[in-house]
Amino acid sequence: MALKKRGETKYKFDLNSNHLDLMIACCYSSNESITMRSIMNLKNFVDMIDEKQYENEYGMSLRICILKFTLDAIVSNSIREYELIRGHVENNLPDQNMKDDMDIIFDSLDEFGELSNSDIQFINDYVSDRLTNLYLYKYEAPLTQYLEKLRTGNASIKELNEKFDNLITELYTNIKHARSTKSSMGSSDFSFRNERSFTEVTNRTIKQLNKPSNFIKTGIKELNNMLGGGWESGRCYVLLGLPKRFKSGSLLNAAIWGAKYNKDIVTKDPTKKPAIVYISMENSAEETLERIFHYASGESIKKYSTRQAQDLILDELTIEGSETDLVVWYRPNRSISTMDLDALLDDLAIEGLECVMLVQDYIARIKPSEYTGDTRIDYGTVVNDFTVKGSITNLY
């Protein structure tokens, strides 16, 4: 059939060795943002590569073979262990030279280190864009053929409608799958009857719940017990109280203790260090630092030199072996909305930090994503915005 033949067509791509190295690294990465759909798209892409284009480029041919057999191991044979995948690749490489040289490729992958979320999204988008264009190109001939029959009247309307329906459905399905990983960090779907998606989400759920960092310890033992272990990943907690009842102080302490008592936090992006972010829209940066110093020492910071004050804060509020940073942002009242949080957290990522817990002081001072002027509704929108942000990014 013509449709089957289209699946066997090979194409030429604007590939280079860096692209292929990044794709191979993606297959072996432990970054949790890599989904089976990403791997499936990558396999579909690799299956369409015209290897003859690179028959005189040994390095490219070697990389394509490694990538092809790696994906075959993962997708077709459901192999997940690193050494077993490598063994599958070595057993299927076509000649001894490639088997001898595959270690060179794998050794070079160490230069990448662990892939960041941005690296993964780059590969997802690169593959998605090219697959989408390829599917459009692949279906050009049969579409043109059917349109010509429609124009000349050489086929019945019913027959053409059936052919168009089947063709468009197949084209739509392929493009939908190709586009499903484009700019999709944080998206996830599963079905009980879809074994791949069900297994993937089940494994990820169990792994997430068994992480030591699934809860941020509050710094108060009984509060940890009440909360089932501490501040839970993906949850939004709202502290309510009357004016002048230490709400801001409690929120600041939550941020301080989050950074102090949680040295085992694991970031979703393994290339980033964890950070507790405290956004103050009431007290200035100087007032917040003064409070932090007082909580740490019980004294006024004005009695100390800059170095003495910094050393005392670090000695009292950090623990050995912890890489968790405390980041304090001051923004004037109503100067930002919840829609600005993504840009702020992106700036943080550029600095090599990943926000694992976000503390906002307080909800009345940040604008909602949709302003109505009704205080009750606007407060609810702010809380909902933070809830959605937390559930998508697994913030605390």
Image (cartoon, rainbow, N blue to C red):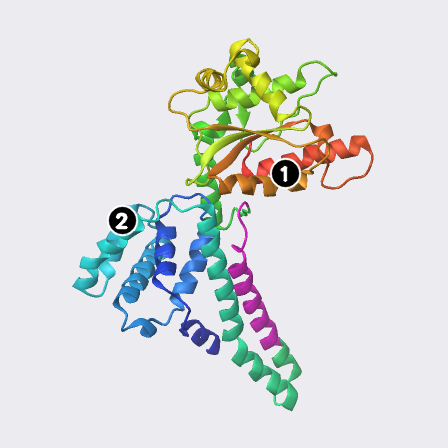
- The residue to which callout 2 is attached is 84
Q: Which label sits on residue 388?
A: 1
Please state if 330 lies on the left or on the right of 26 as rendered. Answer: right
Q: CA distance from mark 2 to mark 1?
A: 39 Å
Quarter occupied by residue 302: top right
- Residue 73: percent from left, percent from top: 32, 55
Residue at screen point 19% across, 65% down: 95
Residue at (77, 34) in percent of width and height = 378
Classify residue 133 as left or right of residue 263.
Answer: right
Q: Which residue lies most toward the top here?
A: 298
Range shown magenta: 162-186
Q: Is residue 212 magenta?
A: no
Q: Are marks 2 and 1 in contact (CB under 8 Å)?
A: no
- The amino acid at mark 2 is Leu
Q: Secondary structure at mark 2?
A: helix
| In the foreground, 157 or 70 | 70
Figure quadrant of residue 157: bottom right
